[in-house]
Amino acid sequence: MRLHDPNARTFASDNYAGVLPEVLEAVADANGGHQIAYGEDVYTARLGEVVRRELGEQAQVFPVFNGTGANVVALTSLMPRWGAVIATGTAHIHTDEAGAPERVSGLKLLVVPQVDGKLTPEAIETEAWGWGDEHRAQPLAVSITQSSELGTVYTPDEVRAVADFAHERHMAVHMDGARIWNAAASLGLPLKSFITDAGVDVLSLGGTKNGLLGAEAIVVLDPSRVDGLVYLRKLSMQLSSKMRFASAQLLALFEDDLGVRTAARANAMAQRLRAGLERIEGVSFSHPTQANAVFAELDLDAADRVRERYRFYDWDRAKRQVRWMCAFDTTEQDVDAFVDAVRESLHR
């Protein structure tokens, strides 16, 4: 039973897109017969092998249901209850997870300024103090998002600068990789080069925004940094009984570079969208377009007229900012039609 138009696509979120055909095939291939539950299956074992190959022999992978769960469990494993995490004011853990890191984990978020969505050593320094002060939550970790919530991408050197600064102060480094494949496609580099080799201790490995059916993972790069993660995953309701299906999906993204290829397509459509909009008077841009997001500024009435045909979100209505997202299934025709809609709305 189909209840929607399978040809309708918007620019609201890459979460709106469906599931990659290769991923559906992987789930079907993992079906049939019995496999041991709760991660003792052959697909999860193979995922562990692949993750170690891609991110280092010390890497440990823990599939979970969603990105918020990955972030919460990962951060909880990095610190005691009196710990605090330094992140930008635009970080997903601060703005879009309903307080889950603080309410579920009991940790404290220390918010600092961002530069195009990215955390810097200078920004971290504003909250990296007070160790040993019983009146202050102890800064014990930093969290960066790759690619960032503003569609920008950290270079390996930028990640390394953050990691070195944090480690020198005995803080762990967490990376929220909800759109990690878009970052890899943008950089044209292997995952290891800007994650493990750059000093990240724990990664939230995204998948849902790149065509998976509700499957993400926590990847531990430095096992000495975490404590009790295997128990915390269950405690936080993120342990899947039929884990083979989550692992099979994640495996599909690694096979034949599927994750990078599909993310590169989304990134390319965002570049095409920006190039088309740059020729339209009345549209300006608030941030670089380095992954699959375009942040633009335009007349609010014009934006609302476009929204009559295409769903998308305001980012900061007071500043006339909107966010347009491309997904793995966005086509050139989709982009060109949207650009025409923006032009018509502004010139109406």
Image (cartoon, rainbow, N blue to C red):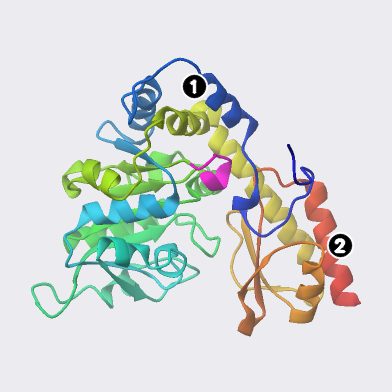
Q: Nearer the viewer, residue 234 or 291?
A: 234
Q: Is residue 198 above or below residue 120?
A: above
Q: Is residue 209 above or below residue 167?
A: above
Residue 298: x and y in percent read: 73, 77
Task: Assess disc 1: are there few (<14), some (14-19) or many (≥20) residues with their C-alpha within 10 Å of its C-alpha.
Answer: some
Residue 62 picture quarter: top left
**Three-letter amino acid code of the residue under disc 1:** Ala
Magenta-tinted stretch: 208-214
Q: Secondary structure at mark 2?
A: helix
Q: Secondary structure at mark 1?
A: helix
Question: Residue at label 1?
Answer: 30
Q: Is residue 7 above or below residue 100?
A: above
Task: Assess disc 2: are there few (<14), some (14-19) or many (≥20) residues with their C-alpha within 10 Å of its C-alpha.
Answer: some
- Residue lying at the far front of the rendered structure: 1
Q: Residue at x 54, y 19 (%)?
A: 29
Task: From the viewer's perspective, tell me whether residue 316 is left or right of residue 87.
Answer: right
- Residue lying at the far bottom of the rendered structure: 318
Q: Nearer the viewer, residue 266 or 136?
A: 136
